[in-house]
Image (spheres, helix red, strand yellow):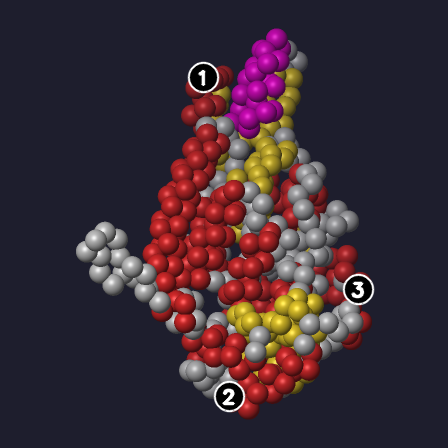
Amino acid sequence: MEPRRSDKLKAESPEKHSGSGRAIVIGPYLRERAARESAPEAEIRRTPDARLDEAVGLALAIDLDVVDSGIVPLSQIRPATYLGKGKAEEIAGLVKSNEAGLVVMDCALSPVQQRNLEKEFGAKVLDRTGLILEIFGKRARTREGSLQVELAHLTYQRSRLVRSWTHLERQRGGFGFLGGPGETQIETDRRLIGERISRIKLDLEGVKRTRALHRESRKRVPYPIVALVGYTNAGKSTLFNRLTEATVLSADMLFATLDPTLRAIDLPHGNRIILSDTVGFISDLPTMLVAAFRATLEEVIEANLILHVRDVSHGDAEAQSGDVRDVLKELGIDPDAGKLIEVWNKLDRLPEHERERLTNLAKRQTPAPVLVSALTGEGIGALKALIEDKLGETRRKFEVTLEAAEGADASWLYRNVEVLDKTVNQDDGTLVMQVRVDAANEGILTAKFGARVKALG
């Protein structure tokens, strides 16, 4: 195994003591040639070092004490243990010497592979899917978030019910006097899990209906939806707080926030939008999690505009961008359809020459990304202006003429549509206002002001 334990990990690790909190993180990655033949494109985008660093970050996100980590290059995946026998024995020795109670495998293990590795290592084994589920379980705060995580966790757990423990094979007596041999414990567990999954799905259908009602009510007022998406820890929540002056939890860790948050904000010309912060994406995001969080991610699907927040200070920014685009495609959203703006975040972490390089690179791209620092506020004004311009591309301009005494109607326009300009007619004192409104809400404007409205194009 190629050791990858950093000095930082050495410094932060407490004195040796046994316990399940002490973990070893293993990156069992196919060699480049083998990976190109069988691995998903997302795995090829990253170097093994970058993938292992992310796995260590995931382990630290649930407060595990990572005492060692390393890469295991593989020529092929073994059906029984994923690793070769020699590597499995080597890791077993590391587990014993480090008194670790947990081995995190940065890959997707089958139930049989997980069971065999646990026997070989003499420690609990957690694969990438299980690790992400643990993080989600810890981060969920709302009832909806908890239900979504529980659904994903039970779906995963049901596939793990293999006959690795003798008590799962014991039969329980049937019901009634003529009861048959009954069902084994494993069958009972599967049945109970299945029943719980059905109940959660019903509850989530209720959540979905409630969200649909909320969206319908928002459509009755001309407030476009702008959704933030991005790789986990790209700075979405910090940007959300900067734009809305809210206090959503933001921290330098993977999956700091899970539950969606929506806030109304006013843009420079008075146009009001609803900004939505969503769960962060990650490479190899378990399919069951995408399915479980679909009710939440529908805010992204229904959005008028999507801000793709990227951490340009990260060494794997391009690979992370590719992973986010993959998840968007999985949700049925075409990243190249014209409603996505790239927001290059964390400028404050870059040296001057790198900032200049990215600025020049952004100017050559169409549409041009916006460079910001959510932490310091740099570039936020330009981002708001671009959001307004992009939303304006699908809106028509109108001219509304008001009497001098109709101040309430002028106030309504400022609250409900984008006011571009206003002039006072010196001859009769009437107020002429140029406004812009999306097609879905043109009827509201014309119904309210009738003959006082004139289309400008």
Element on which disc 2 rests: loop
Amino acid on which disc 2 is placed: Gly
Answer yes or no: is residue 246 visible.
yes
Is residue 60 in the magenta section? no
Residue at figure coordinates x 54%, y 69% from the top left = 126
Q: CA distance from mark 1 to mark 3?
A: 56 Å
Instruction: Characterize the local packing of mark 2: few (<14), some (14-19) or many (20 or more) Cα atoms within 10 angstroms.
Output: some
The image position of residue 169, as x and y in percent, is 36, 69
Q: Residue furthest left?
A: 178
Decide: is 37 above or below 142: below
In front of the other: 127 or 212: 127
Look at the numbered discs 2 and 1 and tell me whether their residues touch, using CB distance below 8 Å.
no
The image position of residue 192, as x and y in percent, is 37, 54
Q: Quadrant of residue 359?
A: bottom right
Q: Start and end of the magenta stretch?
A: 396-417
Q: Of discs 2 and 3, which sits in the foreground?
A: 2
> What's the mark number on residue 351?
3
Element on which disc 1 rests: helix
The image position of residue 381, as x and y in percent, is 70, 43
The image position of residue 186, as x and y in percent, is 36, 64
Say which label, 2 or 1, has the lower sequence index: 2
In front of the other: 340 or 64: 64
Amino acid on which disc 3 is placed: Pro
Residue topped by disc 2: 84
Say which label, 1 or 3, has the lower sequence index: 3
Residue at figure coordinates x 71%, y 50% from the top left = 374
Residue topped by disc 1: 450
